[in-house]
């Protein structure tokens, strides 16, 4: 059974070909953080650039980076995905 976020990936990719920035909102637990960045890494429009993800806390940002690196079997420093936490 596909996860809810998987059904919007084609629309997200289309939106990102038209706009430089897109905000994706979905309920907690839909795996936005761990599924979306890897799905976008090899898109032509990225052109070797980086993906920036914002997380509400430093711990969440680090955990997300480790999880995606583990899934990709790379070290977190070698991914083209950058995680940052939102400072209030």
Image: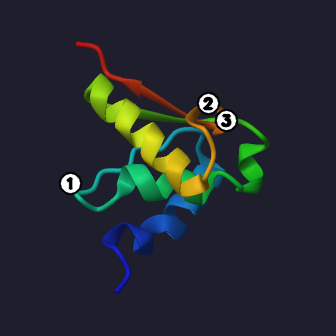
Identify which residue is drawn at 61% across, 52% down: 73
Q: Position of residue 56 (x, y in %)?
A: 26, 29
Up/down of 47 relative to 39, above or below: above
Identify which residue is drawn at 51% across, 50% down: 70
Image label count: 3
Residue indicated by mark 1:
28
Q: Is residue 15 visible?
A: no
* Left or right placement of residue 13 versus residue 87 in this view: right
Whole-Å distance between the Cαs marked 2 and 1? 26 Å
Residue density around tag 1, few if under 14, some if 14–19, many if 20 or more, within 10 Å: few
Q: Position of residue 67 (x, y in %)?
A: 43, 47
* Left or right placement of residue 75 versus residue 44 in this view: left
Q: Quadrant of residue 87?
A: top left
Q: Secondary structure at mark 3?
A: helix
Residue density around tag 3, few if under 14, some if 14–19, many if 20 or more, within 10 Å: few
Q: Position of residue 64 (x, y in %)?
A: 40, 41
Query: Which one is in front in this view, the residue at disc 2 or the one at disc 1?
Result: 2
Label 3 vs 1, first from the N-terminus = 1
Query: Which one is in front in this view, the residue at disc 3 or the one at disc 1?
Result: 3
Residue density around tag 2, few if under 14, some if 14–19, many if 20 or more, within 10 Å: few
Whole-Å distance between the Cαs marked 3 and 2? 4 Å
Q: Secondary structure at mark 1?
A: loop
| Placement of the N terminus among the 4 image quadrants | bottom left
Q: Quadrant of residue 59?
A: top left
Q: Is residue 58 visible?
A: yes
Label 2 vs 1, first from the N-terminus = 1
Q: Label for residue 13?
A: none
Q: Residue furthest top?
A: 88
* Left or right placement of residue 3 versus residue 49 in this view: left
Residue indicated by mark 3:
78
């Amino acid at each position: 059974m596909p996860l809810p976020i998987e059904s919007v990936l084609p629309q997200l990719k289309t939106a990102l070909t038209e706009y430089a920035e897109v905000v994706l909102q979905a309920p907690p637990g839909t795996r936005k953080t761990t599924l979306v960045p890897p799905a976008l890494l090899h898109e032509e429009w990225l052109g070797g650039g980086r993906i920036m993800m914002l997380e509400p806390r430093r711990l969440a940002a680090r955990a997300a980076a480790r999880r995606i690196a583990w899934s990709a079997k790379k070290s977190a420093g070698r991914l083209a995905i950058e995680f940052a936490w939102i400072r209030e």
